[in-house]
Image (cartoon, grey):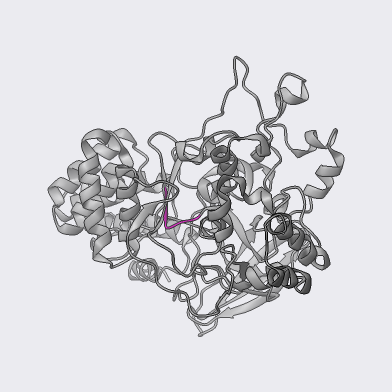
Amino acid sequence: MSARVVRLAPVLLFAAFFFEFQSPAKVSTTGSEAPQYVGNRACAACHSSIYQRYSQTPMAMTSGPIGNNLVEGSFEHRASAMRYKIFQKDGRTFLSYQRTDGATLHGTQELQFFVGSGRRGRSYLFGIDGFLYQSPASYYSQKKRWDTSPGYESSREMPFNRAIEPSCLFCHASEVRPIRGTENRYETVPFRQAGIGCERCHGPGSLHIQGKAAMVNPAKLEPPRRDSLCAQCHLAGEARINQPGRDLSRFRPGDLLSDYVLDYVYEGDFNYPYKAISHVQALAQSRCKLASGDRMSCLSCHDPHSVPRAEEKAGYFREKCLACHLQQNVSVELRRHFDGQRDCQGCHMPAMAGLSIGHTTLTDHRILRRPTSGAAASPAPRLVQFGVKQADTRGLGLAYAELAERSSQPLYATEAMRLLTEALPAYAQDEEVLTRLAYLHQLKGDNDQAAALYESALRNDPHQAAAAVNLGVLYAQHGRLDRAIELWRQALTTNPGLSQASIDLALALLAEHDKTDARRVLVDALRFDPDSGIELKLLHDLGDQ
């Protein structure tokens, strides 16, 4: 699960909190009648063979209700001294947890959905009051073992409140159903169709099955629009920035991805294997792509409707390579190489450890002539916008701001401040620019400017949780606890799993001598983050064990 991480400025307990942004969805229209999604089964009536083959692909199986095919198991996470057990009972799936160091923390949570095709692994999701979170336990298929979910390997407290925002589900499910005004609350079933449906690449099908419109054929699109289909999920740089007023849930086949989001990557070439799904970025570095240009795409080698069986894989991809290379005037030596080597992919696109997801391997799409197994080189710190020579000022500033939140590299904060200050006059109503710039001012101690920017962001979007929490910090520091309490309550309506907002709210209520409400806030917060040491201590000090 990929997420944007922002560390909030300290207040009272100087703790940190993780947050993500969410943008509203919109249904696209064609002419006077808006086409609607109809689901894969509507396609099967006329395309049964393709439907059957596609149903067995990883893309089709990348999310859904858990069902009965779960591999039960258990494991111990040493950093947090927690033991987990995953089991099924009466057709339902549960995660139980128990501290192993003699402490009393234990409990059980029902798991409801999975994400991940299962080729490398799967993570599991659970809901509390309609808010969706990631389980701390994931299953890694290649190692055939349960272990802690990606990003939590060194956590000393049980991670239980990682919010699943719509952008997380976008590349795993079809027709995600978020509730507006929240970060991670959904309808009872958070998506209308499990996995990536046919219509993700061919467009909504209601008019087509009525004989009123043709479906999109990706192979016939102009190259930038064709490539946008794969890049919507398989281009993962250092930051992905929404265009103003747009978000990826509005993307439809035939659109340009850059009309919705801008992707930023490190400048220059570097050793690739430090990202799990940057296939588009890696392919762009290959000699094959550089020499072929728009003639080459993901479709040159991949049939989206099927995946070759393991015993067929080497031969299948060898034929893809030879289809191009034997058309060229190759040397006798190279022709002998082709005749003698039966597995092009095994040599030139080897599997390597996925550094961003433990216990997995991935295919190196740089298609190197002589791959090396050395350690990945650190990329240059500067960012560029993928696919263009001149980066968008707003987007690049927001991308640097994201990196500044998770890195001590001074360049990131400096460039973010410079670029966002330059962009502000043109984006004075842009809540994301306002919030990010406010935080940068807050880090510098320019609290008056930060507060003004946060207030502007909240006027444009009252549901900006980051702005609400951080502005509450500033008001609390100036003794305006009434306004801080209001802002933290507001933030918790967008995501009640925001532990730092709950902690600050409880402390403010205690400062106001409202122990009853402070206790209620802490008890509710522990439903979403039961291993929060600060919350447990505060509740203990109030007389609750």
**Residue 472, can we see it?**
no
Residue pictured at 45% horizontal, 74% vertical: 155
Residue 378 visible (yes or no) = yes
Question: What predominant SS class does the magenta segment belong to?
Answer: loop
Q: Nearer the viewer, residue 171 or 494?
A: 171
Task: Classify residue 347 as left or right of residue 281.
Answer: right
Residue 144 in the image: above or below residue 284: below
Based on the displayed image, in which of its 4 quarters is residue 494 positioned?
Answer: top left
Q: Residue at (28%, 46%) from the top-left corner?
A: 435
Along the line of sight, the residue nearer the viewer: 270 or 369: 369
Q: Where is 421 relative to 236, above or below?
A: above
| Of 539 and 65, the residue lying toward us | 65
Q: Residue furthest top?
A: 32
Q: Residue at point 72% right, 32% down?
A: 38
The percent position of residue 292, horizontal first and vertical second, equals 58, 51
Q: Position of residue 423 (x, y in %)?
A: 24, 40
Residue 511 placement (x, y as % from top left)? 22, 58
Viewed as shown, does residue 378 lie left or right of 418?
Answer: right
The quadrant of the picture occupied by the C terminus is: bottom left
Q: Is residue 508 above or below residue 223?
A: below
From the viewer's perspective, tell me whether residue 235 is left or right of residue 501: right
Among the 4 quarters of the image, the one containing residue 218: top right
Q: Is residue 238 left or right of residue 233?
A: left
Give whichever of 27, 455 is nearer the camera.
27
Is 81 magenta? The answer is no
Q: Residue at x 29, y 38 (%)?
A: 458
Q: Residue 239 colored magenta?
A: yes
State which region is magenta. 236-240
Residue 541, how many percent across, how many down? 33, 70
